[in-house]
Structure formats: C-alpha cells, structure tokens
Amino acid sequence: MRLSALLIIAMTFTAAATVSLVAANFSVTLIEENSEIGVRDALDAKEMTWAEVQADGLQVTLSGTAPDEVARFNALSTAGTIVDAARVIDQMDVTAQAAIAAPKFSVEILRNDSGVSIIGLIPTTTDRDAAIDRFQSIAGQDHVADLLESANYPAPDGWEDAFGFAISAMEKLPRAKVSAEAGRVAITAISDSAEAKARLENQLKRAAPPGLVVTLEIAAPRPVITPFTLRFQIEEDSTGFDACSADTEQASARILKAAVAAGAPGSARCTVGLGVPSPRWSEAVEKAIGALSKIGGGSVSFADADISLIAAEGTERAVFDRVVGELENALPDVFALNARLPQTVDPDAGPPEFVATLSPEGQVQLRGRLTDDALRELADSYAKASFGSDKVYTAARIVDDLPADWPTRVLSALDALSKLANGTVIVTPDSVSVAGNTGNPDASTQIATLLAGKLGEGKDYEVKVAYQEKLDPVLGLPTPQECEAEIGKVVAKGKINFEPGSATIDASALGTMDQIAEILQDCRDIALEVQGYTDSQGREEMNLALSQSRAQSVLNELRARRVITGSFVAKGYGEESPVASNDTEEGREANRRIEFKLITEGPSEDSDETALENGADTGDTDTPSDQTQEGN
C-alpha cells in the first residue's frame, strides 16, 4: 500500500515534468518563429532583402553581405526595433570597396599688378619650393599668395610639363590667368596691343612642350580712336575706305556690307575701337555711303559727328542737291553734314603744292612751296626729328599768297608720312594727299584720324595706303630656320677664330660676331645651342673643357652685343663628331670649330644639315702634340 502511493506520486511528478518540458519547447519555438518572422518582415519592408535572419532561442542572428557599412548599420537598427537589440547577433559581411582614386591635380595661377596668386592641388613629388621661388622672382617675395595643397599620389603623365610651362608662361604675361592640369594648359591674358598679342601667341606656341594641349585666349584692348574717323571714296579706278572705324563687330559688319554694295571689295576691314560719338554711328555711315553711291563719285568723311561729303567734279547740281537733301533728313540726331560740289577748274592752272617723299631706304625729300623761312626751318627740323638728321634733304622755296593754314597742312602731312614705310604726301590749298606702303594694317585709319583732327571740319584729304605683310614688324619676323640660314651665310664668309691655346676670340672674328648679333636681334626667342668642338690632339678631358670655354666665350660676346640669350645654351663637345680626318692639319683645322644649331625636341635625321659650322682656327700648328698638350 505504501509502495503504491509512492509510485503514484512519482508518476504524477514525471507527468508534470513532461508536460512542462513540452510546454517550454512549444514556447521557445513560438518565440523563435515570431522573432524571425518579425525581423525578416521589417527588413523586407526596407528593401534589405540581402540580409538573412535566423532565430536561436532568444537570439536573432543576421547574416549576408551588405553593400556598404551604412546598409549594415541600418539592418542592425531595424532588427533592434523588433527584438531587444542585445539579442541581435551580427554576422554580416560588407562588400569590399575599390581603392580610393587619385585626386585630380590642377592649379590656377593669377597675376596682376598686385602680385601672383596660386591655388590648387599638386603631387608631393612636385618641387613646390622651387615653384614658389620662381613666382617670387616674378612678383617679389612679399607679393606671392601661396594657396597650394599637396597629396601623396604619383604625378599623372603630362603633369610636370604642364606645370612647368604654366610657370614659364606666367613670366611673359603681366596680366593673366593660367589653368594647368595633366597634359593641358589654358591661358587667358590681356596684351598691350595687337602686335604684342601676335608676338605672345607665337612665343607661347613655340615654347609649349610636345604633346601638351595649350589653349590661348589673349585679348588686345580696343584702341581709343580720337576723333572717331571714317573715310570712304568712290573714284574711277578704285572704291573703298581710306579709314574705317566702328564701335562693335556688328556695326563693322553693317558698314562693310554698305561699302560692298557701293562697289568696295569684300576684303575691306574696319577697326573696332572706343570713342564713338553716337550709338547710331553705323546707321549714319550706312546712309552716307549710300548717298555717295547715288551721286556716283567723290568722298565722304566722318570726324566724330561731323560729316564732310565732297562730290566728284562734274556731278549734276540737281542730283547733288536731291541726294544731299535726302541724306540730311535721314541722318540720326547729333550728326552734322557739310556737303560740297567742287567747281570744275582748268587743269593747266597748277595750284601751289608742297611735296614730301620717303624712299624705301629711308631718305626724305621736301619740295614745293612754303610760306616763309620760319616754316621751312620748322618743316626741316620736324622731318629730321621724325626720320633722322642725316636722311632729310630740303629743297622747298618761299612764295607769297599761300593759305593761312598752310603751316598746319604741311606739318600734318609730314606727321602722316612718318607712319609709312615709304610714300609721298602732297599738300594743296584744297586737299592733302597721302600715298604709300606700310607694314601696319591700321596705318590708313591712323592717318585719316590724324588728318581729320588737325585739318578741321570740311577739309578734304585723300589716303591711299597699301598694307604689305613683308613690312609688318610682326608678320615679317624671320622664322628660326630663316635665322639659322642667315647665320650660315655669315659664318660661311668669316670664321670665328680664337687666340692660340685659349678661349679668347681673336680680334679678326669680332666683325663676324657683330653680323651674327645683328641677325639675332630680329630672331626674338629662338632656341639656339652654341656648340664648341676641337680636334683629337691632346687629352680628351682637356679638349672637352676647352670646347666648353670657347662656346661660352661666343655666348658672352653675343650678350655683350645686347642679344637676349635666355633661350641660348653653350655646350662643348670636345673631340666628338669630327667633320674631317684628324690625320692632316687641314682636317684638324676643320674639326676645330663653332657650330650654331637650333634646339629641337628630339634628334632629327637632317641635324647635320641644320648645323651652322664655322672653323675655329687657333694657329697652334707649331705646338707639338703629346699626352699633356691640347690639340684645340
């Protein structure tokens, strides 16, 4: 009985334990399923389907590969809103990120009257201190704003060439902005004149390293035209402008279109400048040219707002009156018209005149009539001051009954003549005529502006000036190859000799140096290497040193003659590259030489042909050759 009661109690406890265990397992499974489903749904709702969720008891494990650290953190935060964050186990991976790309290296350099500013990012391999030293040499130590940053990455291809060229360009440009990056340089600058613009563009293009893309935007300021001048004429043999001024490119196009309609060639040009008297300038010019075309011949001149229209001799009075009346009514406000119909004169009457001629060689002759001795002395002095005291010949005579403004007309004509390379000016009581050749494309406009301002309103003048490129001081500059050829002609006639056993140039060669220096004055920034060579007598190292000293002596002589040698290099080659056999005295003399050679970016197949050779005779033939004696 007692055993049976104990058994019942034991079975009861066993049954209770079994029920509790089953209930506990059921509760854990329910918690796991709810946690896993809840977290999974939350992650799916936020489009984080890459995350895997697995519950183990109260713990929730997140796995999978997150696209980045932000996504991984967001997954953990989302799971923590469903279950206790302490129960979340992180077993997620993150996608490997690519290596950080190298930054873009670039600089911007600004130079003006205040100094130089440089900002940008450069590689640590770039010599920053050397660059700042160069900027300080340009603007002064206290006028350089250094805002450069550096990064420890390799310099990309083309960076060093671009940065070095940017600094070199800034040395030539007092007002400019230069942007440089690997393989590319952009330059924006202001020049003093059109000639300076052309010269700078030529220098920068020649100095750019091969493969470097250079973009140039060099602006030349518009000239101030005072008075604002235009002159158009229609004659039997020619029609066109003696001077043309406009305030905008659009106004210039409108004026030229009217001129072409009146018979002018399409190659005519108009100077765009400052000083226009009215924004309706082009409209007034267009109507005046049209009126002159209707008349059939003559000239129309503008000096600011004053218009002078002179019809051709023989024009019908009725036509002249009708066209002039229409023009007066059509002109914009401000403009005043003075129209004149010349009377037909006897061609045999021969009006008094003063004539000055300028020859291509620079000789000036003054002939014709002057009012008195004072004017003759004044004209002679004025011409000598303009053309040179030894180039003026005066043969003018004194007569009475000349117009009161004759001195003004004569001096104005001489001033106009000074703007030509060669030509003639003729002064009569009714007009001033200027004809000749010039290398300045704006000379015609300048002369017309000069005469309009000095002769006064309503005075007639004629300008027939031809522009010739060969006389242009910018376009007429010789190319480096032409300079090399000219030097070749000089050294073919005279040798650069040295005193025996030294690097001192012999006095007999100084004339040759003078001629070479004169050629180089017009060659600007030509890149030239002055090369020294010796024969094979003596020790090689001594010959090398002697050839270097002689090449340097030639360079020093050029500097003494005020030749700019910043782009020149002196280099001795000793016994290298003989041009003749060293077994004979004639051959050794040929090998003792100085060569002038253009510096190119790489070796050229015809480099031997471009060398300018010149024997350097030393006169050392009586010195025995041994291991301690130079052959020079």
Image (cartoon, grey):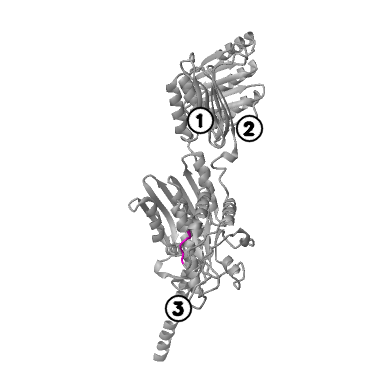
Mark 1 or 3, nearer chain start: 3
- Given this view, does label 2 or label 3 mark the residue nearer the observer? 2
- According to the picture, the residue beneath numbered tag 3 turns out to be 21
Report the span colored magenta. 502-506
Establish if 450 lies above or below 521. Answer: above
- Given this view, does label 1 or label 3 mark the residue nearer the observer? 1
Please say whether residue 340 is visible from this viewpoint: yes
**x, y percentage for residue 525?**
51, 51
Residue closest to the eye, 256 or 581: 581
Q: Is residue 144 magenta?
A: no
Secondary structure at numbered mark 2: loop
Mark 2 or 3, nearer chain start: 3
Report whether 321 appears left or right of 26. Answer: right
Question: Which disc, if any, is residue 393?
Answer: 1
Per the model, the C-alpha gap separating discs 2 and 3 is 110 Å
- According to the picture, the residue beneath numbered tag 2 turns out to be 267
CB contact under 8 Å: marks 1 and 2: no
**x, y percentage for residue 96?**
51, 68
Query: How many residues crowd mark 3 within 10 Å: few (<14), some (14–19), many (20+)?
Result: few
Secondary structure at numbered mark 3: helix
